[in-house]
Amino acid sequence: ERMNCERALLSFGFGRWSRIKEAAQGGTKLRSEEEISQFGLAFLCLCTGVPVASVGFVSGVDDGASGAADDDLEPADERPSAASAAEREGIAAAREVLREMGVAVPSLTRAQEEELEPLVSAGGAEYAERVHKLGASLLQRLLALKRLSDAIERHPSPFDTFEAPPAPGGVGRHPAVSWTPRDDALLLLGVYKHGFRAYEEVRDDPELPFSCLAGYAPLPPPLPQPSASGDGAGPTPQHADFDALDVLPLSPPPPP
């Protein structure tokens, strides 16, 4: 159930609790939106190395200035704390993402810890280790989806008025594919509506009339991917001006 909720969270983004509940599989559909939002908070804390009671504690890592009183906390030598270098690096990278956004590391009161711990306690050590290692990429996904939902929800009728930001460099598009700035907007609207990487649902949605699908003309084969060996073989990625998730363009670099 926890992984179902996590997948839906990473498809739709922080704050879209009703859509997450609708899209999630298994027992998550029986949860309240409040419970799903509590899991979202616990997940965000683990991404940034903030322990949820005994889950996710890493010795030597600031716990985010937890609001719990010192005498309420479990002694450090009784809380699981072994962490690999990959975990510590992941936590540091996630907190750097927060710093770049001007956001403080989250903190929890003791009451919040007790409330959230049952949501992440099953297999907690293994789950926390995984989230610690991937924290920066998971957090970037959540931030990108939040930026997207905020931009779209500012429009009373987004399917009529939402415009995508410019996409410099073509972002790996095949020159034979018919594609316009309107298709950029439809693609982002599709991500908002159906979730990140819901490719077939976006493609088949009649509300999203992509130019390349007019008349159902066959699409060309995918572009070749860069070599995984990193030896320079293969084409150079064409999305260097985009964020790690290829959702929204990065701001241009400042002049030298």
Image: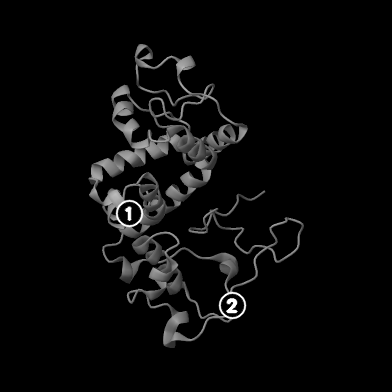
Which mark sits nearer the N-terminus, 2 or 1?
1
Amino acid type assigned to the residue bearing label 1 in the image: Ala
Rendered residue at 32%/24% (across/down) = 109
User: 52 above or below 186?
Assistant: above
On residue 220, the disc is none
Total tally of numbered discs in the picture? 2
Residue 116 pos. (x, y %):
32, 32
Rendered residue at 43%/14% (across/down) = 75
Picture quadrant of residue 120: top left
232 with respect to 58 (left or right) = right
Rendered residue at 44%/48% (across/down) = 143
- For mark 2, does the 10 Å Cα neighbourhood hold few (<14), some (14 to 19), or many (20 or more) residues? few
On residue 24, the disc is 1
Q: Secondary structure at mark 1?
A: loop
Residue 74 pos. (x, y %):
40, 17
Amino acid type assigned to the residue bearing label 2 in the image: Pro
**Label 2 – label 1 distance at C-alpha:** 32 Å
Rendered residue at 72%/56% (across/down) = 229
Residue topped by disc 2: 221
217 with respect to 255 (left or right) = left
Camera-side residue: 80 or 156? 80
Residue 86 pos. (x, y %):
60, 36
Whether residue 254 appears in this view of the structure is yes
Camera-side residue: 152 or 128? 128
48 with respect to 110 (left or right) = right
User: 10 above or below 37?
Assistant: below
Q: How is the image coloured?
A: one colour
Residue 184 pos. (x, y %):
45, 69
User: 158 above or below 245?
Assistant: below
- Tag in front: 2 or 1: 1
Q: Secondary structure at mark 2?
A: loop
- The answer to whether the residue labelled 2 contacts the one labelled 1, judged by CB atoms less than 8 Å apart, is no
